[in-house]
Image (cartoon, helix red, strand yellow):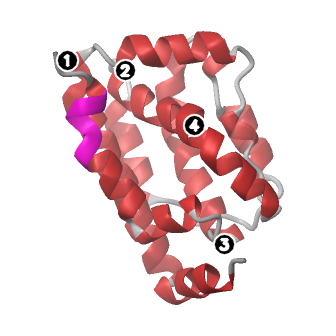
């Protein structure tokens, strides 16, 4: 049986392979890029989390993370996609976003901490219940189109970040890391 994980694997890998994704994975993302990324996440979560259990809400923790970072650039891609999600079932988007924070957060949080970058948004009040929700959502194949659209939105956000600051700062950050 196919799961959302399998149905979105290609786009997940595309996000990881993107220069911004690589900078995150390698712990070389700049504070500005991190702020821009978290701003986009917060814009998406403002819609997605409305239909989820309270313990999964990310607004306050993303706000805390953003409060210690440079002023973020607004993401047109995130705002546009968030508007499309308003009023509908957001299971596909929630699966992608919370899966990223929950699973990817275990990898990224220590790397961000070494750089002095915040990652409170990867911590959940009830981690077991949040993980159980994500695991259950994997079988919601009717959410495949939305999950794939969410990954495409994240790729657009990454493209915006590159366009805002240019690849030069990403390349320098990658070269400067220990």
The quadrant of the image that shows the N terminus is top left
Residue 19 drawn in magenta:
no
Q: SS class of the residue under badge 2?
A: helix
Horizontal side of 138 relative to 167 (left or right) equals left
| Rendered image: mark on residue 91 | 2
Q: SS class of the residue under badge 3?
A: loop
Nearer the observer, 7 or 46: 7
Q: Mark 1 points at which residue?
A: 142
Q: For the residue carrying disc 4, how many other residues have a C-alpha within 10 Å: few (<14), some (14-19), or many (20+)?
A: many
Q: Are marks 1 and 2 in contact (CB under 8 Å)?
A: yes
Q: For the residue carrying disc 2, how many other residues have a C-alpha within 10 Å: few (<14), some (14-19), or many (20+)?
A: many
- Which segment did they paint magenta? 5-10
Q: Mark 3 points at which residue?
A: 30
Q: Are marks 1 and 4 in contact (CB under 8 Å)?
A: no
Residue 7 drawn in magenta:
yes
Nearer the observer, 105 or 95: 105
């Amino acid at each position: 049986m196919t799961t959302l994980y399998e149905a979105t694997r290609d786009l997940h890998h595309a996000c990881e392979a993107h220069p911004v994704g690589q900078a995150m994975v390698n712990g070389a993302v700049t504070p500005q890029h991190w702020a821009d990324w978290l701003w986009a996440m917060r814009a998406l979560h403002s819609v997605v989390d409305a239909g989820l259990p309270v313990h999964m809400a990310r607004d306050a923790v993303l706000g805390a993370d953003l409060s210690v970072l440079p002023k973020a650039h607004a993401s047109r891609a995130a705002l546009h996609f968030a508007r499309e999600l308003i009023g509908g079932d957001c299971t596909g988007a929630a699966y992608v976003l919370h899966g990223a924070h929950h699973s990817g957060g275990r990898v990224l949080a220590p790397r961000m901490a070494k750089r002095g970058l915040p990652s409170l948004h990867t911590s959940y009040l009830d981690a077991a219940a949040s993980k159980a929700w994500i695991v259950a959502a994997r079988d919601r194949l009717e959410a495949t189109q939305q999950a794939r659209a969410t990954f495409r939105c994240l790729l657009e956000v990454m493209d915006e970040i590159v366009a805002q600051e240019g690849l030069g700062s990403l390349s320098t950050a990658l070269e400067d890391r220990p």
